[in-house]
Image (cartoon, rainbow, N blue to C red):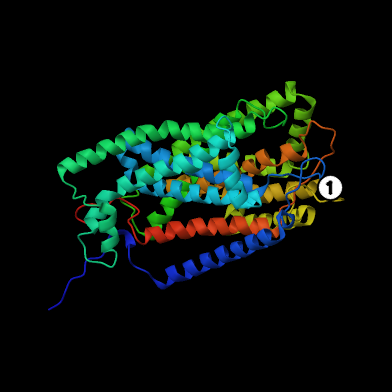
Amino acid sequence: MSVQVQRLPYGVGRFQVGFWLFILVLLSVVGWGIYAYSRQLVEGLVVTGLRDIGTMGGAAWGLYIAFDVYFVGVSFAGITMAALIRLLRLEELRPVSRMAELLTIVALVLAAFSVLPDLGQPVRGIVNLLRYARPQSPFFGTFTLVISGYLFASLVYFYLDGRRDAALLARIPSPLQGFYRLWAAGYRDTPAERERHHRAAFWLAIAIVPLLVTAHSTLGFVFGIQSGRPGWFSTLQAPAFVVMAGVSGIGLLLVIAAVFRHVLGERERLHEAIFRWLGGLLALLVLVYLYFTVAELLTTTYTGHETEVRLTLALLTGPYAWLFWVSMGALVLGLVALLLPYVPSVVPVRVPSFRPAFTRAAGLAAAGAGLLLMIHRHGPRLAPAAGAGPEPEWVGWVLAGLAVVFVLSWFPLFARSVVAAGVAGGLLVNVAAVGKRLLIVVPSQTHGTLLPYGPGSYTPTWVEYSVVAGLFALGTLLYTLFVKVFPIMEVAEEQ
């Protein structure tokens, strides 16, 4: 007599060889990051590029704080989208709700781990937070609202959202059956229980949305209310932090949804309407952030204080210009990619030189040449190395031309596929988000001092790069492992 084994949905509980190889690679990167952090714990912050402001001509905040802000920003869009899907009954976006919730939890864990290396002595920092914390300080609000309250609320919401699926999966014999019963905690999906569950989740969603805006505004106030630091002291810091958080989070959610659409083969559930909806919202947020950027630049260059003008010139034409224009270019290109599917196609242009093979080869040549030029001129620095002279003007024009040809080669694909446009836009805006976080954190410390100190510099070391790479690998590892033990989308009764 044959026994029919019922498989769990969405690849849960199935572990192929490729999966274990992927996990092995992630564990290797995480292990390297742990080794790099162990060197920092043993030798101190001297192994990093962090130095005192002014007297040592450096920056006390660098890569760690920049990625802390980035991870917190990514977390914003996740739980916000999940809450709005429930509050506004956006049934079209229901398949990405759990992806967004899990993204929030993983990103907040990475944000907490990003702060710890910057403290130098993590245990001492945590103890002193409890001993000397001032409730009126934005730093206190950042840890209580973002790391504690925000994470706790997200975990509760995630738990409630998964109880129904856990109860359904607990009926299927599998090695994970005990785990599902523990998660369900007696939930049987009766009409009365379902109504009570929806009511509790609805009111929790209402409480979460203002908490999220307050938490991310508080993180912006950490920078925005420092009147002695040009470049940070601005009314737009808090709303800009909220908008850029939405940009980076929704952009990453687009990429994650496209990955699961391909890996799980769920083209019907993860339909194109989801990518149109998220892509349109992302394009709107990018336009708002571009407006904030232009308004702030016009204000600082036209009527700003002398120190504000010097800092702005350092961003536009000075040592940080390359990072600023790369970030802005990625933001604009991401916006163009998101809008291409909505542009009506006219007569197709057939030019032999615009064949995909030629243009993509030109793009790879541009990327390689640009990378070699950056390494030669900057090394691992954010600012140019000492004694590096200007390159000939034609070098920049050739690189720009190759890059434009490369981007144009992909435009027909973006115009035909809203999914491809969403992935390209999501990746580009996240590149811009990382660059903008670095530009917020670093230049105001090296070029924005009001005291009579000369310009400084910040050079991240292999330790900082390794720790950040380990954090990204850790986040990917946590996300991947969870997907293998619990459905990443809601389970239908017939599944």
Residue found 86% across the figure and 49% down from its top: 389
Q: Count numbered badges in the picture.
A: 1
Quadrant in the picture for residue 33: bottom right
Quadrant in which the C terminus is drawn: bottom left
> Is any atom of residue 417 visible in this view?
no
Viewer-side residue, 81 vs 295: 81
Quadrant in which the N terminus is drawn: bottom left
> Is any atom of residue 352 visible in this view?
yes
Name the residue beneath numbered marker 1: 390
Residue found 78% across the figure and 39% down from its top: 318
Viewer-side residue, 435 vs 212: 212
Question: What residue occupies the far left of the structure in this picture?
Answer: 1
Q: Position of residue 201 (x, y in %)?
A: 30, 39
Q: Position of residue 286 (x, y in %)?
A: 54, 35
Viewer-side residue, 471 vs 131: 131
Q: Position of residue 473 (x, y in %)?
A: 53, 59
* Horizontal arrangement in the rendering, residue 348 relative to residue 460 (left or right): left
Q: Label 1's element?
A: loop
Residue found 80% across the figure and 26% down from its top: 306
Question: What residue occupies the far front of the structure in this picture?
Answer: 131
Amino acid type indicated by mark 1: Pro
Circle 1 Cα neighbour tier, 10 Å, few/some/many (<14 / 14–19 / ≥20)? few
Q: Is residue 432 above or below residue 32?
A: above
Viewer-side residue, 357 vs 299: 299
Q: Position of residue 21 (x, y in %)?
A: 47, 71
* Horizontal arrangement in the rendering, residue 18 relative to residue 2 (left or right): right
Question: What residue occupies the far top of the structure in this picture?
Answer: 303
